[in-house]
Image (spheres, helix red, strand yellow):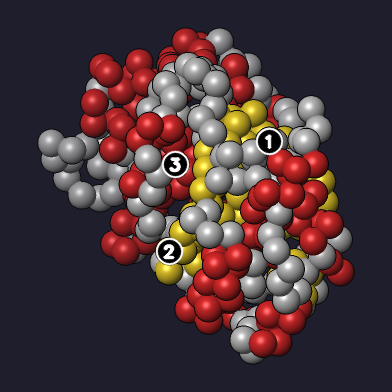
Amino acid sequence: MMAAPGKLASFRLPPLPTVGELIKLYNLRAEKQLSQNFLLDLRLTDKIVRQAGNLRDAHVCEVGPGPGGLTRSILNAGAADLLVVEKDTRFIPGLKLLSEAAPGRVRIVHGDILTYRMDRGFPGIISKTWEEDPPNLHVIGNLPFNVSTPLIIKWLESIANRTGPFAYGRTRLTLTFQKEVVERLTASTASKQRSRLSIMAQYLCTVRNCFTIPGRAFVPKPKVDVGVVHFTPLVRPQIQQPFKLVEKVVRNIFQFRRKHCHKGVEKLFPEACRVELTQEMMQRADVDPTLRPTELTIPHIRALADAYAHLCNHEPNLLGYEFREELRLKHLTGQRNTPMDTPTGIPPGPQQPC
Ligand code: SAM
């Protein structure tokens, strides 16, 4: 429904210097080594903000506001409480100016989003149970790519554990990524871009590829294209196992993306019991061992994770076994082939499964 004109005017910002003028005023040169690329076109920042949904009276956390283009669009969309988390001190004066233009609506945190405790950033009263509709809290951000990918991996684990931004319920995220990462996040079964990230994101969330932002819209222009992605955590994750277990199964399977999937599954087990337990796991999951990792659906991965959890219940030390760690130790000890029962050349101790 359209807002009454008077109502809309009440949360639009008063006239301010443009974002470009602010950049000049505060000498906010983009730091190349921090991969800072600014969005100055407010029509575009409005379009990003629209992907989040209705922000009227919403609580919003904006990550990496920089010179504040997206920040203005969030305020113009009617957010009642906007918490911005910015790492670079140079942007704080410009953000204060914005905050003065929207009295009582902007809170500025000078900090790192990778360590910021968002579970303490908003009033508990806005919380919803997991099964309810999402809370009126949104996370929006145009972050550097070297931050947005580790951040989404961290937040996927937070979704599984209902911590951080998800301590308030199924908080929605609207974030930018380089196009290649967008393709991986949203890739469907059998597509070329299907990867670990596709499975981890899609088993926990509805992931929507909203639109691509042309590189020329940024100052300075990045080398890669950029996409906007919207995440809504699912009421019931498609795999009901601990995040770390799912992550381990998926990581092992995808380490040989072009081979049959049983190749990766084998590496979940120490040499001594590899053949036998791989066969048991594939049979229990009822998954064709000759499928390629990219051909596996989320129900396939669910069946494999459930089968692996079952085997770990019988042999708890299995969960701590890491093939890569075994390789590293082999490398350190200079061994090529090790006895079947001592895969690392280290005598089996209480931690050695099988
Ligand atoms: N959002 C602004 C825009 O769209 O024009 C700035 C985008 S720029 C790509 C990324 C911003 O994130 C910069 O302001 C940078 O200082 C900030 N930033 C980078 N790493 C951060 C972190 N770990 N925590 C919070 N902010 C961060």
Badge 1 amino acid: Asn
Picture coordinates of residue 174 (x, y %)?
64, 45
Q: Which of the 4 image quarters holds residue 230?
A: top right
Picture coordinates of residue 258 (x, y %)?
69, 40
234, 343: nearer the viewer? 234
Instruction: Please name the residue that numbered disc 3 is placed on.
Output: 165
Describe the element under mark 2 as helix, strand or loop: strand
The mark that comes first in sequence, 1 or 2, is 1
Instruction: Please name the residue that numbered disc 1 is placed on.
Output: 54
Please determine whether, in this image, residue 236 is positioned above or below residue 56. Answer: above
Badge 2 amino acid: Val
Residue found at x 52% / y 43%: 59
Describe the element under mark 3 as helix, strand or loop: helix
Picture coordinates of residue 29 (x, y %)?
66, 85
Q: Is residue 28 left or right of residue 273?
A: right
CA–CA distance in space, label 1 to label 3: 18 Å
Instruction: Please name the residue that numbered disc 2 is placed on.
Output: 109
